[in-house]
Image (cartoon, rainbow, N blue to C red):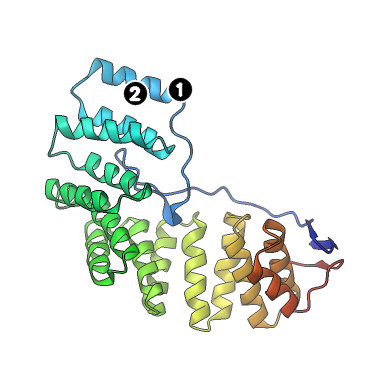
């Protein structure tokens, strides 16, 4: 249950059975990121970096070793060290695609989009079937509002790697932004099937289902999402809206209250809580 005890304090008293959340990153040392672009676990422990450095010391001309250590640096935000290692890997083997794509991701994350696109282009030239490069470049094109180029790259990523949930998820986001919610919902459904422990495609599919007035279907996905990621304010707020549309004010108020516990100033949750008649000092059943 959610109990609102004070005008500005929401106490969460429901105990939820939570499932561990896993992410789906690129393979082979790639740091293409997980669905939803959440931060990945720290990968630069002294032991890990030290071990990779030992490998490099024994094999100073191994581009894969530099790419792996660069990935460890990149995942933890040590961008300059990551770029140095990826650049070294490229200098050793200019036809090795992963370090181009990984360096491009670091450039993208640090706001250097032109350098990122150039590196994605080089990765694709080195390996025309390297799905991670098409995916990363597609995300950049989408960010630049170049929907046609983004769709072409996402389609290529899906064709090359049909078991990659990120390709479907990102193409779904593109469709969703264009209001093509039937196509978006279909891509998110595929992403969920490939990565069922990730909350982001569940939330995104729910949003498209809400746009299609399938409120019951949206609720089912949002119930899953808040179990997978209980601190996701967007999931709780969207869940509140879905239950509001279904006429279940109790669960709606409980969902909005949980969102306000995460961030008391979050306007959509506050407005929704008020809209369904939520009252401070009352307890609401969320499930």
Secondary element at tag 1: helix
- Relative to residue 156, is residue 271 drawn left or right? right
The residue sitting at 27% across, 61% down in the picture is 158
The reply to whether dot 2 and dot 1 touch (C-beta < 8 Å) is no
- Relative to residue 172, is residue 92 drawn left or right? left
Q: Position of residue 253 (x, y in %)?
A: 74, 72
Instruction: Please tell me in which quadrant of the rendered image residue 35 appears.
Output: bottom left
Q: Position of residue 90 (x, y in %)?
A: 18, 35
Q: Position of residue 180 (x, y in %)?
A: 37, 79
Instruction: State which tag comes first along the sequence, 2 or 1.
Output: 1
- Closer to the camera in the image, 2 or 277: 277
- Closer to the camera in the image, 88 or 59: 88
- Relative to residue 269, is residue 212 drawn left or right? left
Q: Which residue is mark 2?
A: 52
Quadrant holding the C terminus: bottom right
- Whether residue 149 is visible, yes or no, is yes
């Amino acid at each position: 249950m959610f109990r609102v005890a004070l005008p500005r304090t929401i106490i969460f008293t429901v105990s939820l059975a939570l499932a561990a959340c896993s992410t789906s990153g690129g393979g082979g040392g790639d740091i293409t990121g997980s669905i939803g672009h959440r931060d990945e676990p720290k990968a630069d422990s002294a032991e890990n970096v030290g071990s990779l450095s030992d490998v490099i010391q024994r094999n100073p001309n191994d581009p894969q070793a530099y790419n792996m250590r660069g990935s460890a640096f990149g995942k933890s935000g040590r961008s300059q060290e990551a770029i140095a290692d990826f650049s070294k890997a490229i200098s050793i083997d200019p036809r090795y695609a992963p370090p181009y794509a990984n360096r491009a991701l670091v450039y993208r994350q640090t706001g250097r989009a032109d350098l990122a696109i150039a590196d994605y282009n080089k990765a694709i030239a080195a390996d025309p079937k390297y799905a991670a490069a098409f995916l990363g470049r597609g995300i950049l094109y989408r960010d630049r509002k170049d929907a046609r180029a983004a769709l072409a790259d996402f389609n290529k990523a899906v064709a090359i790697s049909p078991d990659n949930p990120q390709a479907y998820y990102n193409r779904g986001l593109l469709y969703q932004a264009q209001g093509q919610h039937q196509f978006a919902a279909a891509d998110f459904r595929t992403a969920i099937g490939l990565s069922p422990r990730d909350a982001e495609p569940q939330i995104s599919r729910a949003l498209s289902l809400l746009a299609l007035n399938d409120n019951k279907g949206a609720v089912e996905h949002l119930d899953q999402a808040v179990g997978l990621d209980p601190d996701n304010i967007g999931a709780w707020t969207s869940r509140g809206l879905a239950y509001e549309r279904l006429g279940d004010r109790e669960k709606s108020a409980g969902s909005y209250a949980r969102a306000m516990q995460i961030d008391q100033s979050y306007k959509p949750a506050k407005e929704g809580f008020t809209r369904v008649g939520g009252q401070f000092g009352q307890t609401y059943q969320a499930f």
